[in-house]
Amino acid sequence: MTLAREALLGPSYFYHRRLIEESKGWSGDQIRGYQEKRFQSLIRRYGERVTVKDDYRDNPRRFTRWDMSPLTHSVRTGGTTGQPLCFRADTFARRQKERAYLFDIWSRVGYKPHDLRLCYGVDIYGNDLVRFNHLENAVHVSPGATMEGELGRLRQWIGTLPPFFLHVHPSSLYTFIELLGENLFRSLPVRGVIAGSETFPIVQQQQFEREFGIPVAHWYGHSEYAVLAYCCSACRGFHFYPTYGKLELLPADTEGYHRIVASSFNRLGTQFVRYDTGDLAVSPTGSCRTNNFARVDAIVGRSQETFIDNAGRKRSLFGYIFGDEKSILWDQIRDLLVIQDEIGALRVHLVTVPGANKDEIEQILKQRIPVATLEFEYVAAVDRSPSGKRRYFHSTLAQQ
């Protein structure tokens, strides 16, 4: 990396790079000492009660520090689970800090700052099929522009690329492979896949790595920048960076899971304090020798991604569908979407591999989910949004 490019990363990047490296060797007591000092400062200023999006939407000034242009600017969440939340973020340090942590995660599959990335569906640039970001050294392919008539040009162009990292949402990974064709994809010099922004079940990560021989870097974060965790290749759980924010696991009304409650360590802009992210996690069992970071065994998605069983009880789909990574089910399924239109009943849309045994698939899923009636439909692809994203679960019950 040249000195000019290194300078573009900014002082905050190098400050956090140092913190990250130091924290990997901290003891549990050192981590608690670092976090408690910052957490108690937030509690003294804003109180101890758990907050939700409406608290920041209804009274944004109460949770904002040093809110003045050009120090801060407005940003917004994606709104995939409802009305977007607008809040204030640090204009100068936020991006530098994010790069420090994301680059650390991406380095687990060999990425170094300014390596070439091909991004599919990560950022959308109008109707351009391909756009190059010189500052990031990233090529962006827009899902909205990958129409049938453009695919030949896309396939021809992508075959000319030097080695690159593929940056996708987990749910759009196989969509991208299908657009190119599997044979072409296998011939590309993909050095690694970096996939975040949504749940990527470990069984599907491992299936992809086995099938294509390409390593995957996966992480958990959200638009509010309150906590961040990477998926550990050793324990396959998620480790939360202690210098990024503070994690709390509080009881959830979904049996067997906990709510992810986050407090941000950002100095300027909106301060998220004991913020209920709406995400669910599986509490850690056992230990991992990699470091002493706070850890969960799995992150199972939004609390909205739960179905109602035939007894009227709320259950997380994750444990039923993705709980057994050794099952032969995942040798036969490429993709799926579960839909609930009525209590105790689920419609399962399945994309299978050639030669799949449909009777076996249905038998396994019925055994996995005995608390609901299942109806199966085999489709060429599951529905996605214009950005190429989709969830594994969709419910219309709240709309009825």
Image (tube, helix red, strand yellow):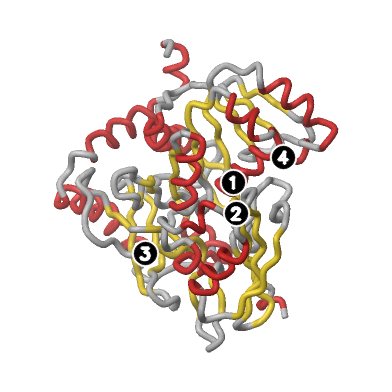
Task: Kindly report which numbered mark, 1 or 4, lies closer to the viewer in this rendering.
Answer: 4
Q: Is residue 158 above or below residue 213?
A: above
Asked whether the beta carbons under mark 2 and mark 3 sit within 8 Å of each other, the answer is no
Compared across the picture, whether 176 is left or right of 209 comes to right
Find disc 1 in the rendering and name its residue: 74
- Write down the residue under mark 3: 282
Residue tagged by mark 2?
A: 86
Looking at the rendered image, the quarter that the N terminus falls into is top left
Three-letter residue code for mark 2: Cys
Identify the amino acid type marked 1. Ser
Q: Crowdedness of circle 1 by 10 Å Cα count: few (<14), some, many (20+)?
A: some
Quadrant of the rendered image containing residue 86: bottom right
User: Which numbered dot is residue 143?
Assistant: 4
User: Which circle's residue, 4 or 2, is located before the other in the chain?
Assistant: 2
253 or 352, which is in the foreground?
A: 352
Mark pair 3, 4: CA separation: 33 Å
Instruction: Give coordinates of residue 360: x percent, y percent.
Output: 56, 65
